[in-house]
Image (spheres, coloured by chain):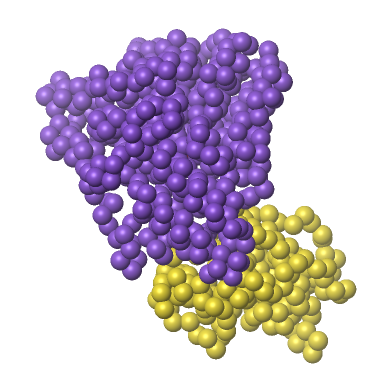
Chain colours: A yellow, B purple
């Protein structure tokens, strides 16, 4: 496989087209949601992502990710990674979803050193090659960073008796993803 | 000094085959030009020859430039303008010779070139100075509420953001000249935008995104008619065709060494000595002062007034070697060579389905920075695909978001040629670009 095909695995190209979860939808009644807007000033890529959480139907403590809805513009890596994110985390209990984000980040930051655990990461394992391209790391993390940010606020909202609807947080990805 | 012979009728005109009469380099000549640039012989990825088409961002450096810096450092390295020892004297001499050489290269005298860190810093010195930020009495140039600063919609952020800031500080208003659909300034607008309230007209000589070369005489005439100061961003012109700033009659201009075979870390703010003399310093400290007491300080004349602190000495010396290198080849020949390549590049991409050029689609009044939008494929992916074949281009907004927005894009892929670029590289770029949409399933 050429370097290019290693980076652009067919799974990635497919997700870049399919864009699972694309389009901002309103959260169902009773659910809590929060938006995060992430922008990569280097290339102008942006994503607005809405994380929707609900209390678990079986009454367990952990809330569940009910939806990940997003819009934005960007390269195939950023579009595909956000699409994969949607596929992986919708339906997961929140602690598992945040664990997955950590797992993904560790893989992306490992510069191709960490063998991805496909059992855990599923389609996201296809992004292992991105770590070798320092200037693409931000692309792969864009949607996931937005998810992490939106999720924490959606969960906080869910647990608040009277949610305070504030303006959506806007932040640029100042975090050194390729550090 | 070693100023190249410039044809007065053609200064600041990209020329090229139809205008100048200078010939493009022959294949043998290009090979000889390239042999002086060590980096051009490297390979990329799976053994692909490097096709460096990103000189608009930064150019490569020839052995003469690398050697000049090393020779200086291995023989005469010292602090300049101080110390009585032999090395300090040699260093000062070489450093001031460099100033004269760079000044001569753009048709000015040596006291009309201020060393800066880069072009961006030069523009900030002017914009801050005019808003009499820092030390210095508000002189005749001071921006005030009610004044207007005019730029264009094709500016690099370096020639836009400092003016936005200056307006925010002073209450002046920022206005701009719009663009037509072909990527040229909409000069029908000129009389409406440049008025008696205009205090500054700051514009780029050549656009780093569109490649457009702007009609300096027309813009200078409009500014002069209303008594406005002219500030020229010459980053993409001075490296590519003969530019004589006095003949162009602009008040101030900026350019960077690293885009013209020189090192990073040095640029120039150049211009009329009486305008520089009216500008207050914005960075103060050592080297720029005459008399200092505990209470107050008097400043030196330009250029030293704007050069606080220890200057970039070895960089200046390397830049001297760079302008000598360009002059020896002939800026008119370099312009003709790039003109030929630009025509080939434009003709090549014109035939590609789903590829749109931002900027003029003919090489007339144009430099060889060609930005394209590939339908259905993000520029980052385009750049990665090209890199896989050893082709280095710039992707993104190239520090010019407004001009991208004007043409309905957020980012683009830019190929930019220079004296060492070849027809083979241009052809490889076009051929590879033609396969991008297929790979990403956009065709
Ligand atoms: C037209 C133009 N203006 C200004 C600049 C800024 O130059 P520098 O980054 O060297 O200050 C550039 C370089 O990208 C440019 O192309």
Vertical placement of A157 versus B162: above or below? below
Vertical placement of B438 versus A176: above or below? below
Name the residue: 57% across, 35% down.
B155
Name the residue: 57% across, 39% down.
B360
Q: Residue extending furthest right?
A: A29
Looking at the image, can residue B97 be seen? Answer: yes
User: Where residue B356 sits: x, y (%)?
Assistant: 59, 51
Name the residue: 45% across, 9% down.
B274
User: Where residue B409 sits: x, y (%)?
Assistant: 64, 50
Picture quadrant of residue B16? top left
Name the residue: 44% across, 55% down.
B429
Quadrant location, the N terminus of chain B = top left
Question: In front here: B221 or B321?
Answer: B221
Vertical placement of B440 versus B273: above or below? below
Decide if residue B308 is on the left or right side of residue A15: left
Question: In front here: B337 or A140?
Answer: B337
Looking at the image, can residue A51 be seen? Answer: no
Marks counted in the figure total 0
User: Where residue B373 sits: x, y (%)?
Assistant: 58, 53
User: Where residue B375 sits: x, y (%)?
Assistant: 62, 58
Decide if residue A115 is on the left or right side of residue B178: left
Quadrant location, the C terminus of chain B = bottom right
Question: In front here: B371 or B262?
Answer: B371
Decide if residue B301 is on the left or right side of residue B75: right
């Amino acid at each position: 496989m050429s370097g290019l095909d290693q980076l652009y695995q067919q799974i990635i190209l497919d997700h870049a087209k399919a864009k699972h979860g694309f389009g901002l939808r309103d959260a169902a009644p009773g659910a809590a949601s929060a938006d995060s807007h992430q922008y990569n000033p280097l290339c102008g890529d942006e994503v607005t992502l809405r994380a929707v959480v609900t209390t678990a139907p079986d009454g367990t403590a952990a809330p569940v990710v009910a939806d990940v809805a997003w819009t934005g513009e960007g390269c195939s890596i950023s579009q595909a990674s956000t699409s994969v994110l949607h596929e992986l985390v919708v339906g997961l209990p929140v602690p598992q979803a945040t664990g997955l984000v950590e797992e993904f980040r560790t893989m992306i930051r490992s510069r191709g050193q960490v063998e991805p655990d496909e059992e855990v990461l599923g389609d996201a394992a296809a992004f292992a090659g991105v770590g070798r391209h320092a200037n693409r790391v931000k692309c792969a993390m864009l949607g996931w960073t937005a998810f992490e940010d939106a999720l924490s606020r959606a969960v906080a909202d869910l647990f608040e008796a009277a949610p305070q609807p504030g303006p959506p947080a806007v932040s640029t990805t100042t975090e050194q993803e390729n550090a | 000094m070693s100023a190249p012979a410039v044809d007065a009728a053609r200064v600041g005109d990209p020329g090229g085959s139809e205008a100048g009469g200078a010939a493009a380099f022959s294949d043998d000549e290009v090979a000889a030009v390239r042999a002086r640039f060590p980096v051009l012989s490297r390979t990329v990825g799976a053994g692909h020859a490097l096709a460096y088409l990103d000189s608009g961002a930064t150019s490569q450096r020839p052995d003469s430039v690398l050697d000049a810096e090393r020779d200086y450092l291995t023989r005469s390295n010292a602090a300049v303008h101080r110390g009585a020892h032999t090395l300090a004297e040699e260093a000062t001499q070489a450093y001031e010779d460099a100033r004269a050489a760079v000044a001569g290269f753009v048709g000015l005298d040596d006291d009309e070139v201020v060393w800066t860190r880069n072009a961006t810093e030069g523009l900030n010195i002017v914009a801050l100075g005019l808003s009499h930020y820092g030390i210095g009495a508000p002189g005749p140039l001071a921006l005030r509420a009610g004044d207007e600063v005019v730029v264009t919609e094709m500016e690099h952020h370096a020639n836009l953001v400092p003016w936005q800031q200056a307006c925010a500080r002073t209450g002046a208003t920022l206005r701009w000249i719009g663009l037509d659909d072909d990527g040229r300034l909409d000069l029908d607008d000129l009389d409406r935008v440049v008025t008696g309230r205009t205090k500054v007209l700051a514009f780029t000589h050549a656009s780093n995104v569109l490649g457009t070369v702007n009609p300096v005489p027309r813009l200078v005439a409009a500014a002069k008619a209303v008594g406005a100061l002219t500030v020229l961003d010459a980053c993409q012109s001075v490296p590519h065709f003969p530019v004589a700033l006095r003949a162009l009659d602009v008040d101030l201009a900026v350019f960077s060494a690293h885009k013209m075979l020189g090192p990073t870390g040095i640029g120039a703010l150049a211009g009329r000595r009486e305008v520089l003399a009216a500008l207050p310093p914005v960075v103060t400290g050592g080297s720029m002062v005459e008399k200092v007491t505990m209470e107050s300080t008097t400043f030196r004349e330009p250029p030293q007034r704007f050069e606080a602190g220890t200057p970039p000495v070895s960089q200046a010396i390397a830049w001297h070697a760079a302008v000598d290198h360009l002059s020896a080849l002939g800026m008119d020949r370099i312009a003709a060579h790039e003109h030929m390549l630009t025509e080939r590049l434009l003709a090549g991409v014109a035939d590609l389905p789903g590829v749109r050029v931002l900027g003029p689609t003919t090489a007339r009044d144009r430099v060889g920075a060609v930005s394209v939008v590939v339908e259905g494929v993000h520029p980052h992916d385009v750049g990665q695909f090209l890199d896989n074949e050893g082709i280095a281009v710039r992707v993104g907004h190239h520090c010019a978001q407004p001009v991208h927005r004007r043409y309905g894009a957020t980012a683009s892929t830019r190929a930019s040629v220079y004296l060492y670029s070849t027809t083979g590289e241009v052809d490889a770029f076009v051929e590879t670009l033609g396969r991008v949409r297929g790979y990403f399933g956009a065709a």
